[in-house]
Amino acid sequence: MSFIKEYAKKLVTAEEAAKVIKSGDWVDYGWTTGTPVALDAAIAARYDELEDVKFRGGILMWEPEIFKVPDVAEHFTWNSWHMSGFERRAINKGFAFYAPVKYSELPRYYRENIVHTNVAIFVVTPMDKHGYFNFGPNASHSRAMIECADVVILEVNENMPRCLGGFEEGVHVSEVDYIVEGDNPPIAEMGAGGAPTDVDKAVAELIVAQIPNGACLQLGIGGMPNTVGSMIADSDLKDLGVHTEMYVDAFVDIAKAGKINGMKKNIDRGRQVYAFGAGTKKMYDYLDNNPECMSAPVDYTNCAATVSQIDNFISINNAVDIDLFGQVNAESAGTKHISGAGGQLDFVHGAYLSKGGKSFICCSSTFTSKDGVMHSRIRPTLANGSIVTDTRANTHYVVTEFGMACLKGMSTWERAEALINLAHPDFRDDLIKEAENMKIWRRTNK
């Protein structure tokens, strides 16, 4: 059978495909820009026929229709690999939950621990002449998700960028059960946030000064990593490479400024490697059919063994807060969930294993709560219920607007002293007292 005939045989409406789902099913819903739209609406329309349908997905970039049905918790449960704002609000409504994950292991979770999924649904590019659909900027764990599914349903969107790779970046029509042609909405965009603050700029300046020519970059999501990217684009750095979990707009700016060629990389020379991408249309247009960019599964991109092969690997990520022991929380505010572990620990560990590599955890020294009170992000201990994303043994460099400290090799009193020096001056005396009480303070004066 020709690919075109096989495609036509499997082509159905969203409403027809949605009938496959039964009460009690586990349904995978793609990832970021791969989350279905037409199929989502069709499934939501059937809500009163369905009970206990359990969905998996993550980093939702819009609120799906299944979230909006009456008495949603009676019909649907959302399980997220990494939370966005839409998902955090769903937690408060009682039908969404976080699945703790070491992101580099996610494909293996599917193949060895989850093993079975009833239905996998996600958005892809149109089929090419060889019968393949491309995952767009979502190689991540998509291939593993398909391998574990009883039924695979694709929603085709002509606006999805075709993201080239080396392996596991697409699926053949022969492996698909149903194909739905949606209305081709624009691919959802994720902005870089507002203009950088003075604090963002101060932190970025400290980090950029540590980056050598020929370094390979990983940037996390958030204002500070994006500010670092902007400064790199305006710097004199050259011969940079990219090997990252998430591809963000900052990489496009750095590349178009002529700073990226990837020729100093020990592996994947000349390629900008990433597991998924979410940003603006500028970024999607840049990734589309770009042979310089390599879409790859997350068990390759985030594997510490992979990262360790790349010299001068620079990892830059955010934190919610840090305690005086050097434990980093990047996931929650106490028991209030914010995002997820993602690949932060993967890159913290991998960057340190790299020859000349450095991992930077950056944050502002303070934040202001809704009641107008200023709080320190450098804390004696993490708040009750806060998650330890990076253990104290793994933390490398910590950066605030007041300076930078390398915690590797430091004893507890040295760490406390170094981190207190990074705190806002208004909080240092109280932190010293707490350090004394915890028996991790050695100096008798400041």
Image: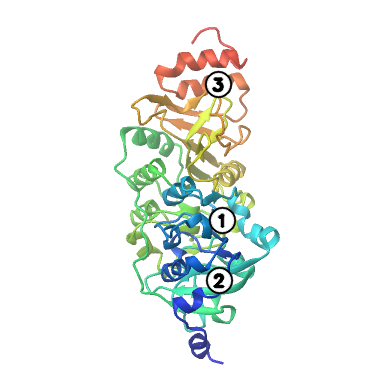
Where in the figure is residue 49, as x and y percent of width and height?
51, 69
Query: Camera-side residue: 167 or 268?
Result: 167
- Alpha carbon separation for disc pair 3 and 2: 54 Å
Query: Which numbered dot is residue 21?
Result: 2
Task: Quickly name the residue at label 1.
Answer: 301
Quadrant of image for the N terminus: bottom right
Q: Secondary structure at mark 1?
A: helix
Say left or right for 245 vs 186.
right
> Residue farthest to the bottom?
1
Upstream in the sequence, badge 3 or badge 1?
A: 1
- Alpha carbon separation for disc pair 2 and 1: 33 Å
Query: Camera-side residue: 120 or 285?
Result: 120
Q: What amino acid does circle 3 point to?
A: Ala
- Find out whether the residues at labels 2 and 1 contact each other: C-beta distance under 8 Å: no
Q: Residue 164, can we see it?
A: no
Q: Secondary structure at mark 3?
A: helix
Residue 143 position (above or below residue 212)? below
Task: Quickly name the residue at label 3.
Answer: 416
Residue 421 position (above or below residue 142)? above
Q: How is the image coloured?
A: rainbow
**Which numbered mark, 2 or 1, is in the foreground of this view?**
2
Say left or right for 432 vs 281.
right
Query: Which numbered dot is residue 112?
Result: none
Q: What amino acid does circle 1 point to?
A: Thr
Q: Secondary structure at mark 2?
A: loop
Residue 18 position (above or below residue 77)? below
- Alpha carbon separation for disc pair 3 and 1: 33 Å
